[in-house]
Every structure is written in structure tokens, then in C-alpha cells.
Image: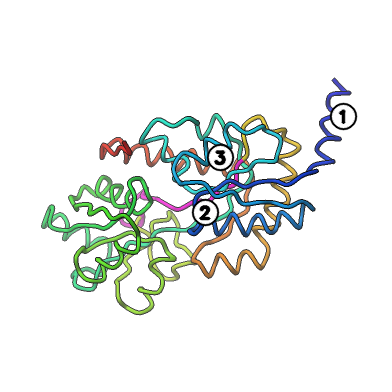
Amino acid sequence: MVTAISATTTWAQDYPTRPIRIVTSEAGGGNDLQARLVAKGLSTALGQQVIVENRPSGVIPGDIVAKATPNGYTLLLYNNTFWIGPLMQATPYDPIRDFAGVTTVSVSPNILVVNQAVPVKSVAELIALAKAKPGDLNYASSGTGATSHLAGEMLKSMAGINIVRISYKGAGQAMNDLLAGQVQVAFPTAGAAAAHMRAGRVRALAVTSLEPSPLAPGLPTVASVVPGYETTAIYGLFVPARTPATLINRLHREAVQVVKSAEVKDKLQSAAVETVGDTPDQLIARVKGDMARMKKVIDAAGISAK
């Protein structure tokens, strides 16, 4: 047994001896941006090239990493879609059983906004208007199961209101129709909403995180009116299950240094994303908590990705 432990320790000390890959979604977007920032920092810290491998969004990145050899050379960087997808359709991986956490890279709330023609200035007023005119208000969202979609369905369920979802292929089109007055309500990411908020083109009512966010100073939370309401974009770094703890600890230590570096913090803050850098267990706790909240919403609304 002592020999086996010594061999594992030696292996971990030698790691890495060849390039590492971080699998993520297509080029462009939050997953890719953060994967490239983490890869750059880890390349320097570990003394080996860390390559970003872009794959089509959906179940493909998770499937690749779940089936990879658990030796620290294949990582996954992905947001909520990775673990929410299995709540809406069968997937070839289980986000809890088949993965171990490394660290939470970042978090970012969505922003509850309305177009300027909607006569409300608070979440309470919006709920009152929706109750007075059930089915008259609609909200824009992109992607079934995206945070902009589930944030709206969560508000409907928890506040007991009827607002109609208008689905769009992309967040840009959804925002354009909100600005044009074609839809009344939306839950864009903080990054997508920031410029329009500053220009006064939309009226921001609240953040969707449980606590106020430094990314949207002065905005209250939806939870201050609807207790327990919470939905946040979470970006995490994962490895396959059964990866030795010594390797996870090494990756965690180096990844946290990268995430908390001034360069990464500044670049992500400019994209309206807040860096975290917590423990592997804390990342998995975030994932489990998000899955539990969203399962209630998905089941109540009968949402399916099929």
C-alpha cells in the first residue's frame, strides 16, 4: 500500500509531462472566452501547453470529458447548460456521477429588464401588472433551458403570474425586439444588458442572483420581492470522475491563482462576469443547488429539449 501511494505521489509530482486540453463549446461566447483565459494562465503555471478544444454546444463536450481517461489531461469548462441539459433530455453522462469539480471560474446574474413603454419601476409593480392582465405581457428568451428562459419560468412559477414566452434563436435578436417594443420583459445576461441600461434604452428592475451583485450596483434582487428566487450563470472547471485527488488538488491550486489574477479579473469584469476561484466541493455544491432549483422549474413548466 505504501508503494502504491508513493507511486501516485511521484506521478502527481511529475504531472504534467504533455499538453493538456480544455474542452468547451464553440468558439465565441462566455465558455470559450473563459476557457482561453484559463488555458493561457495554466500553460504558464504548469509549464505545458494547455489547448482549448472547441466542440458543438450541447452534450458533446460533456460526453467527451466523461469518457476521457481520468489522468488530468482532459478538462471541461462549461456553464449551467452542462448540468441543466440532463434535466430536460437523456444525456450520455451524469454531471454529478461522471465528473469531479476543480473550481468555479465565475458567476454572473441575469438582469430583469423591461422596455421603456412598460409602466413599472419595480419587481412588485411588474408582478402586480402581470396579475392584473394575465397573458398580456410576454418575455423574450433565447435557447430552451438557457438562464434567460428559466429565469422567466421561475418568476412565473414563484410569483404566480402568467407572462408568455417568446423564443428566439439568439440573445441579440431577443434584445432587439425588446428595444423595439415587440416584447415587454427579458432576462438578459449582465453583459448583454449593461450598455442598454447605461444608455437608458431599457429599464432594469432587479438582478436574478440571491444577493445584490457588484456587476449591477444599486439594483435590488428579485428575491427581495419573491423569496428564494435565484438563478445565476455559473462557469465551472471540471475533470472526469476518478481523477486522483493529488491531480485535482494541483489543478485547483493553479486554476485558482489564474482566476484570481488581476489580468483575468479585469477581462472578465469588463464582460460583466465576476471571478470566483472556490474549492472543488463548493463548485459541486453550486451545481447540485442549481440543479435542484431548476428541476422544480423545468418540471412545473413541462420543459423538454426534445
Tag 2 residue: 31
Residue bounds of the magenta highlight: 223-238
Q: Secondary structure at mark 3?
A: helix
Q: Earlier in the sequence, mark 2 or mark 3?
A: 2
Up the image or down, 29 lies above or below 100; here it is below
Q: Secondary structure at mark 1?
A: helix
* Quarter of the rendering occupied by the N terminus: top right
Tag 1 residue: 6
Up the image or down, 113 lies above or below 80; here it is below
Image position, residue 149 (x, y; %):
32, 50
Q: Earlier in the sequence, mark 2 or mark 1?
A: 1
Viewed as shown, does residue 5 lie left or right of 299? Answer: right
What's the distance in space between the residues labelled 2 and 3, CA to CA?
18 Å
Q: Nearer the viewer, residue 306 or 124?
A: 306
* Quarter of the rendering occupied by the C terminus: top left
Up the image or down, 32 lies above or below 266; here it is above
